[in-house]
Amino acid sequence: MERINTIARIIALISLKTFVLSKSETGELLDKLGSVWPQGVVPKVKSIKIYEVEEGRRLLIADETVAVQVQDSIVPFLGSKPEVLQRFPSVTVDMGAVKFVCNGAKVMRPGITNFDSFKKGDIVVVKDQTHGKALAVGVALEDSESAKAMAKGYVVENLHYISDKMWEAYKEI
């Protein structure tokens, strides 16, 4: 059975579309990230290799830096260095919300126990309450101040989470 799983992973890896961005495309992408990501997080790299995991979902790899593109949003990869993820605002969720977040669910207000300050549309890291580990990365659907006042509703759109296809594809690359 393990051999079948290994063969399936190799076939999936071979079927990944890969390409390298030109210098001008890399520069444009880094400029875009510089306007959305916190200052000092975007690295200075010469080229970025793209792995198309599935339609609309890509891994962007440059040296040690990895990001995930979901449609038009580019968020840091959860396997990135902890100091990168710490530069982004975060929300902390109670342990009851962990299994839902790790299955791709949007982060709802009742499960959030702590907020950093962020604006609607900002990239937000979702952490667990017990260990403070990053579980997911998404985009804020509300300002942190508005979300604190809410009793229910969605606060963060989950774009990348531990054990999703992007996570598994990166392990195979």
Image (spheres, grey):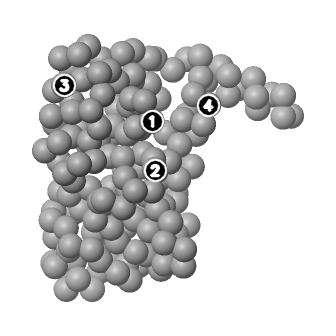
Q: Earlier in the sequence, mark 3 or mark 2?
A: 3
170 vs 39: above or below: above
Residue 132 in percent (x, y) is at: 48, 72
Mark 3 to mark 2 CA distance (whole Å): 22 Å
Spatial CA distance of label 3 from label 1 is 17 Å
Q: Residues within 10 Å of mark 1 (few under 14, many from 20)?
A: few
The amino acid sitting under disc 1 is Glu
Q: Nearer the viewer, residue 134 or 45?
A: 45
Query: Disc 3 marks which amino acid?
Result: Gly
Q: Closer to the camera: disc 4 or disc 3?
A: 3
Quadrant that contains the C terminus: top right
Question: What number is the disc on residue 81?
Answer: 2
Front-most of 50 and 2? Answer: 50
Judging by the rendered image, the residue that carries numbered circle 3 is 27
Q: Which residue is mark 1?
A: 64
| Amino acid under disc 4 | Glu
